[in-house]
Amino acid sequence: MQKHGSPETIYYERLAHRLAIQVCFADPHGPWQRGTTKNTNGLLRQYLPRCTDLSDYTQRELNAIAHRLNTRPRKCLTFTTQLEIYAQLRRHSPVALGT
């Protein structure tokens, strides 16, 4: 993956600077660099097939789907959940996440 300096990514660069983190983007023709994204999209499609009109769902239903995905253990996270990782980061991070 490489860093890009296009106008579209200027906000990411500012955010990375403010949070003192590195932000990288996958190369356009490098699908192997997007494994987690591809996997997450596949999981999401179990609940919301392609071309689904989200206006047919209530916010409560969408929140329930998000909760199911965020509380699903992931192999890439040593079988912890995304919600558990987020909670750990909130406890140990000097930066206020989620604000």
Image (tube, rainbow, N blue to C red):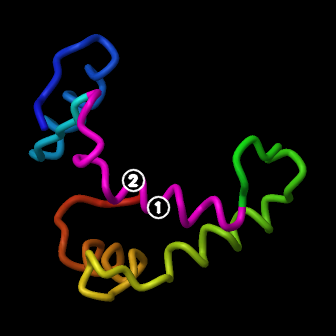
Q: Main secondary structure of the magenta part?
A: helix
What residue would you read off at disc 1? 40
10 Å crowding of disc 2: few (<14), some (14-19), many (20+)? few
Determine the secondary structure under disc 1. Answer: helix
Question: Which residue is located at x 22 percent, y 31 percent?
Answer: 27
Asked if 54 appears above or below 12 in the picture, the reply is below
Asked if the stretch drawn in magenta spans residue 42, the answer is: yes
Mark number, residue 37: 2
Disc 1 marks a residue whose amino acid type is Thr
> Which residues lie in the magenta part?
28-47
The answer to whether mark 1 and mark 2 are in CB contact below 8 A is: yes
Query: Where residue 72 appears, x then y in whole percent?
Result: 48, 82
Query: Where residue 5 appears, x then y in whole percent?
Result: 17, 17
> Which quadrant would residue 47 be assigned to in this image?
bottom right
Disc 2 marks a residue whose amino acid type is Thr
**Residue situated furthest right in the rendering:** 56
Q: How many marks?
A: 2
> Which quadrant would residue 69 be assigned to in this image?
bottom right
